[in-house]
Amino acid sequence: MVKKTRIKDIATASGVSIAAVSRALKGQPGLSEATRQRILAVAQAEGYDFSRLRNGRIKRLLFLLHKQHNIASALPFYSSVMLGVADACRENEVAMSFQPIGPDDPVAELVNLHQPDALICAGFLEPEILDAIRTLALPTTLVDLWAADFPCVNPDNFHGGFVATRHLIQQGRKRIAFLGQSLHHYSIRQRVEGYQQALFDAGLTLSAAYRVETPPVKDIEQALVEGMDGLLALPRPPDAIFAYNDVAALVAMRACARKGLNVPDDIAIVGFDDIDAASWAHPPLTTVAIDKRELGRDAFRLLSNEQGERNLLQPVRLVIRESSGSGRGHAQLRPAR
């Protein structure tokens, strides 16, 4: 089998960085003409497959996901997003691969093992990872994340947090707690802002004790259990929970069951994402639904949408089930802005 020449091999032979090789191969600015020609000559001598660059067509795509997004708490969401990306890749004859990544990893080396022409990065990524991705000079789209200099596609997290909380208020709930993770994640921060706006609009003022933000730890479910136990131990415990995602909402439901509390009579619960397990729960979980597969397809479309919109906001809808004290059914709620 003939060994494929990698960008890393060209960088080593040329004595330059991987980013410099990428710029030279793609004809991007930032290099002297002498350096560019030297890199191209080395690439040709090393047998690099220049057909990959023809017309800028994407032939190989790499899907990056943070290592912290483990199976229990995140893959029910991100696996559907990845399937949407895979659908778009298949329709456009693009080969797709997957790489989990963390802040201590050699980002450039891991990416270049896959020899991608473009990247889709899903969910929370630390600034140092994004900085490393910038140096690769590859077309990149962020999904369920936002950064000013990248094309991004996100669900309308603010509106979702708002309508979920407003729904609980309309059910007569007054002490609505938020159960979530670190606000370093863009999506969670937006959902909290929507939650707070709904409380403000209703004239409800709650102490900080009603807002639980668990630290970014490996055992997120245990941290959520502890957060929920703390909420239920308050002198005036919440009569409703808005959870940052469905997994957290299901943890909250189990915590209530252990305490002998009835959902929704004693405490109403609403989640976010509408993963499959939400409708299987007992009682079925009211949640904010996202078209996760379409989110992935939108991320792929942004890669080649250079003249169009760079910040897509996908509508969400409130799916009303029994956990919030309402009957079965759902209501479509479009963004207000």
Image (cartoon, helix red, strand yellow):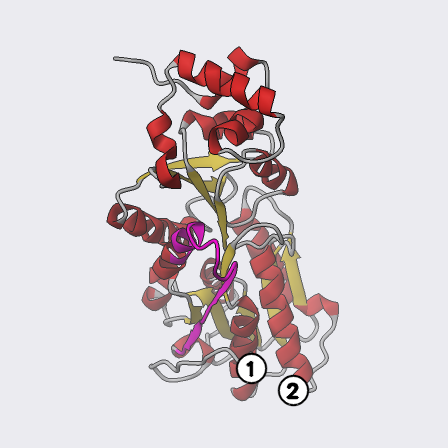
Percent from the top left, x then y, of residue 273? 44, 63
Kindly identify which residue carries mark 2.
202
Kindly identify which residue carries mark 1.
166
Between residues 34 and 249, which one lies in front from this camera angle?
34
Residues rendered magenta in the picture: 298-320
Residue type indicated by callout 1: Arg
Residue type indicated by callout 2: Ala
Percent from the top left, x then y, of residue 142? 51, 50
Answer above or below: position of 143 versus 110. Answer: below
The N terminus - image quarter: top left
| SS category of the residue bearing label 1 | helix
* Disc ID at residue 35: none
Disc nearer the start of the sequence (1/2): 1
Answer above or below: position of 249 versus 45. Answer: below
How would you rate the neighbour count of disc 1 (Cα within 10 Å): few for under 14, some for 14-19, many for 20 or more?
many
Does residue 106 appear anywhere in the picture? no
Q: Which quadrant would residue 120 be assigned to in this image? A: top left
Percent from the top left, x then y, of residue 130? 59, 41
Judge whether residue 266 is colored magenta.
Answer: no
Q: Residue at x 28, y 47 (%)?
A: 92
Answer with left or right where residue 223 lies relative to residue 270.
right
Q: Given contact means CB atoms under 8 Å apart, are the residues at marks 1 and 2 in contact?
A: yes
CA gap between label 1 and label 2 equals 8 Å
Q: Which quadrant would residue 62 be assigned to in this image? A: top left
